[in-house]
Image: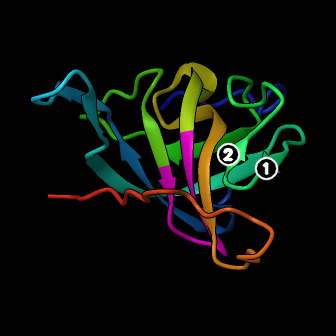
């Protein structure tokens, strides 16, 4: 079995994979008017290691100051053999105080051995249950992914 080169990157230990995420794809379809309906159906649910790459700033429920296009979070998941994850997919974080939608910006196969996939993501929208309703605006409509 091929080994991951631990000199450059380290593979996650079993105890580090403690966050539950849902990997989602994006679909767009036109409605009867001029706009489009964006849906994010869930592809699969898994455990992940989530690390912050750099600081980010959230105003209300959205990333600000051009942080929405810069990867700020690294999510490492176990690579499923039958699923391909592409740039532009969505990651929905279920655990923690805030439910977060991440947008996948970069993808890396850790050690090129098809065991772990490292997704560099940016925060798109978050829904924090600890927010103060008087000072922080909640998201207008919150989507949760549906798994079949």
| Residue of label 2 | 62
- Name the quadrant containing residue 82: top left
The residue at the far right in this view is 55
Q: Is residue 13 magenta?
A: no
Residue that appears at 48% across and 37% down? 115
- Name the quadrant containing residue 14: bottom right
Q: Position of residue 34 (x, y in %)?
A: 22, 21
| Residue of label 1 | 59
Count of numbered badges drawn on the protein = 2
In the rendered structure, are the residues bearing label 1 and label 2 in contact, judged by CB atoms less than 8 Å apart?
yes
Is 132 left or right of 35, judged from the image as shown? right
Q: Position of residue 19 (x, y in %)?
A: 58, 65
Q: Nearer the viewer, residue 32 or 115?
A: 32
Is 146 left or right of 72, judged from the image as shown? left
Looking at the figure, which quarter contains the C terminus?
bottom left
Q: Nearer the viewer, residue 77 or 12?
A: 77
Q: Position of residue 70 (x, y in %)?
A: 74, 24
Residue that appears at 63% across and 34% down? 121
Q: Is residue 97 magenta?
A: yes
Is 31 left or right of 44, judged from the image as shown? left
- Residue range highlighted in magenta: 92-102
* Secondary structure at numbered mark 1: strand
The residue at the far front in this view is 33
Q: Position of residue 46 (x, y in %)?
A: 42, 57
Circle 1 crowding by C-alpha within 10 Å: few under 14, some 14–19, many from 20: few
Q: Is residue 56 above or below residue 126?
A: above
Is 44 left or right of 7, judged from the image as shown? left
Q: Nearer the viewer, residue 112 or 119?
A: 119
How far separated are the C-alphas under marks 1 and 2? 6 Å
């Amino acid at each position: 079995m091929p080994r991951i080169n631990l000199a450059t990157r380290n593979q996650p230990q079993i105890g580090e994979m403690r966050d539950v995420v849902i990997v989602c794809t994006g679909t767009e379809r036109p409605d009867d008017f001029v706009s489009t309906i964006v849906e994010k159906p869930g592809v699969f649910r898994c455990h992940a290691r989530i690390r912050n790459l750099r600081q980010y700033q959230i105003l209300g429920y959205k990333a600000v100051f051009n942080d929405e296009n810069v990867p700020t979070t690294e999510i490492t998941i176990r690579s499923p053999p039958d699923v391909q994850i592409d740039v532009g997919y969505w990651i929905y974080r279920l655990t923690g105080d805030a439910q977060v939608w991440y947008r996948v910006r970069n993808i890396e196969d850790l050690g090129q051995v098809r065991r772990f996939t490292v997704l560099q993501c940016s925060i798109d929208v978050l829904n924090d249950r600890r927010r103060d309703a008087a000072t922080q605006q909640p998201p207008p409509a919150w989507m949760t992914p549906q798994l079949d």
